[in-house]
Amino acid sequence: MSGFEVAAIGALDEWRAHHGGFDAARSRDGRRVVDHELTMQYIGLTANALEPGEQAGYWHAHSRIEELYVFLTGRGQMALDEEVVDVGPGTVIRVGQDVWRTWRAHPGSHGELRWLCIRAGGEPLPYAPDDSSRAPERPMPW
């Protein structure tokens, strides 16, 4: 048994073709719940793609889970409680507990809005990892 797993989620321009969600009622084109494909214990990951003008169609908030949105391509907007934030390649938004959120791909976007959503809960992370070990004497494999 190995302590790691590998999944191939495809190139960015292939994400829209995936149809998925957390359950059948919430599935849509352009969503892939990667943590359903891997044995993940403390974090979750979705890969997402919306066409220009498409939107989530719902608001949501979490009471225990923190989310990190990493936008890769396209242009869009996220509504966070009462604020609207423009998003595009390189925008990273951390959303804490009890913050209402929704999003859309801007109708004038040149291409799909694509992003990763990373979900986590549990203990606060230390400023720097305090559980790691280094092996400088171990030779590199390449």
Image (cartoon, rainbow, N blue to C red):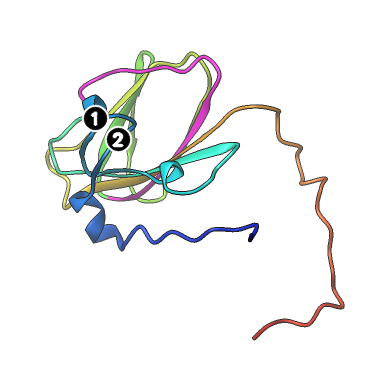
Which quarter of the image is occupied by the C terminus? Answer: bottom right
Residue placed most toward the observer, 60 or 24: 24
Residue depicted at x 17% and y 52%: 111
User: Is residue 25 rendered magenta in the image?
Assistant: no
Residue identifier under label 1: 24
Q: With 87 as the anchor, is 58 left or right in this view?
A: left
Residue depicted at x 45% and y 16%: 99
Over which residues does the magenta segment extend?
Answer: 56-73
Q: CA distance from mark 2 to mark 1?
A: 7 Å
Residue 47, horizontal then vertical, whole percent: 35, 46
Say what amino acid the circle numbered 1 marks: Ala
Determine which of the numbered discs, if any, sits on residue 96 in the image: none
Q: With 33 as the anchor, is 137 left or right in this view?
A: right
Tell me the crowding category of disc 1: few under 14, some 14 to 19, or many 20 or more residues within 10 angstroms, Cα based: few
Q: Secondary structure at mark 1?
A: helix
Determine which of the numbered discs, if any, sits on residue 21 in the image: 2
Query: Taking 47 as reference, is 57 above or below it?
Result: above
Q: Are marks 2 and 1 in contact (CB under 8 Å)?
A: yes
